Amino acid sequence: MAFTSCRATRAERAQPMAGDALVEDPVLTLTHAIDLSVSPARAWPWLVQMGAGRGGWYSWDRLDNGGRPSADRLVPEHQRVAPGDVLPAIPGATDVFRVARVEPGRELILAWPAPDGGQRGSWEFLLLPAARGRSRVVVRARLGARALAAAREGTAGPGEPVASRIERAVLRLPLVLLRPLGALGHRVMQARQLRGIKRRAERDVRWGATGDELARAMPGDGVVPTPSHHATWAVTVRARPEEIWPWLVQMGKGRGGLYSIDWLDRLFGFLDAPSADRVLPEWQGLAPGDVIPVGRTRGWPVHAMDPRRTLVLRIAEDDILVTQSWGLYPLDAETTRLVLRVRAAVPAGPRSAVLLALLVPQEQVMVRAQLRGIRRRAETLARARVTAPAL
C-alpha cells in the first residue's frame, strides 16, 4: 500500500475540523486520510484503544511503543475513553496525549499538553461513513509554537526513550528545515499507522455483532491467543437460552445436523441427512471430551461448556487449530443474543493464504445460514411454549 493511499484530498486538507481550535496558529498542519472497506462502527474500536501500554499506535512499534507489538485484537478494557483521559505517548516518557473530545463511532480528538497549560499540538481522527457500508478516516495533526519552545527548554534525562530524543532534535531545527523534515517524518509514521488500522479493521470478519460483542472476551479465546483468522457472528433470537441450547448440543453428522445449507453440507460430505427440525432427546447429553461427528473431518471435540451459556469446540486438523465459541447472552426474559466466535491459527505461507482466501467467503455464507437456521428452530420452540394451552 503506497503512501499515496493515505493522501487526503484537497477538500479534506482545506476543511475546518473540530480540533483546529486547540492550536489556533499552528507551525505545521498535516492532514491524511485512508479508505476502509468496513463501517465506522467496525473501525472505531481500533481507534479508541490506542495509546502506549494500551493497544499501541499501530505504527513503528520500536519507536512509539517501546518495541512492544501493537495489539492485533480488540482489548475490551480499553474500549472506553472520556474527555480528560490520558493516553501515554511512549512507554517510559513523560509526554502524554489527553482526550479533548470524543464522539463514539465518529470522532476522537487528542491534545498534546504544554507545561504552561496550553497545547503543544492536536491530533484528530474523524470517521466518515461512505457508500456500501464503507468508511473514510481523516486524520489531522497540528503542531503549535509551544512544542518548539518546550523542546528548546527541555533536556534529555537518563533513560529517555530514543523516540523522545529524536522528537526533541527535530523540533529544535530552524523552521525552514523543520517544516519539510517534520512533514516527511510525520507522513511516514501516519501512513504506517493508517495502514495498520486498515489491516486490523478489515481483517476482522463480523456479521451481526456489535462493537461490544466484537471486543468481549469469550471462553476459548485463550486456546488460539494469536489467530491468523478470527470472526465474530451474532444474531438476536426471540427465545430463551434453554430453547436455543438443545440445537447446539445435538449438532453433528448422524445427529441433529448443522442447520445451514443442507444440500451443500451433504454435497461436501459433512452431513448425510437433512438437519433436524425437532429436538432429539438422545443427543442432549453432550459433555467436555465428547466429539461432535462431522463428515470428512476428525470431528469437533468439546473443549469446554457451561450448559445454556457457552459451548467451546477445539478443532485440530494437521497443523491448523480452530476454535468455535458459542455464547448465549440474554437481553431480557424472552430474547437472547446468540454469538459465535471462530479463531484459527494457520501457519504462515502461500498455502495458508490460499486456504484462507477460499474458506473465508464460504464461511460467511454457511455460518450466516447456520445462525438463521438455529434462530428459526429456537423461535419455533418459543412460539410453541407461548401458545401451549395452560393445564
Image (cartoon, grey):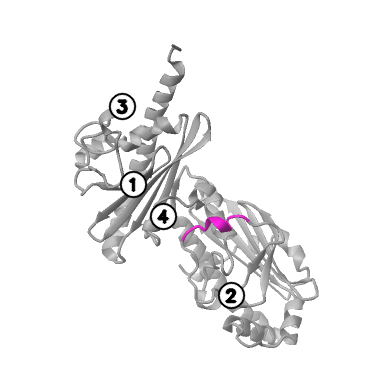
Residue at 76% x, 82% y is 149
User: In the image, 53: left or right of 72?
Assistant: right
- Is tag 2's residue or tag 1's residue first in the polypeptide sequence? 2
How many residues crowd mark 3 within 10 Å: few (<14), some (14–19), many (20+)?
some
Q: Which residue is mark 3?
A: 277
Q: Residue at x 41, y 31 (%)?
A: 242
In the rendered image, residue 63, in percent from the top left (x then y), is placed at 54, 78
**Along the horizontal axis of the image, is 20 left or right of 371?**
right
Could you tell me which secondary element the residue under label 4 belongs to? helix
Q: Position of residue 55 (x, y in %)?
A: 54, 64
Q: Quadrant of residue 223?
A: bottom left
- Cα separation between marks 4 and 2: 27 Å
Q: Secondary structure at mark 3?
A: loop
Spatial CA distance of label 4 from label 3 is 31 Å
Labels 4 and 3: the sequence-earlier one: 4
Q: Is 39 colored magenta in this rendering?
A: no
- Three-letter residue code for mark 4: Asp
The amino acid type found where label 2 is placed reads Pro
Crowding around mark 4 (Cα neighbors within 10 Å: few <14, some 14 to 19, many 20+) is some
**Which image quarter is the C terminus in?**
top left
- Mark toward the start of the polypeptide (2 vs 3): 2
Q: Residues within 10 Å of mark 1 (few under 14, many from 20)?
A: some
Secondary structure state at the residue bearing disc 1? helix
The residue where tag 2 is placed is: 91
Image: magenta residue range: 73-80
Residue 308, how many percent across, how many down? 41, 37
Looking at the image, is mark 2 or mark 1 nearer the viewer?
A: 2
Q: Nearer the viewer, residue 114 or 324?
A: 324
Of tags 4 and 1, the one toward the viewer is 4
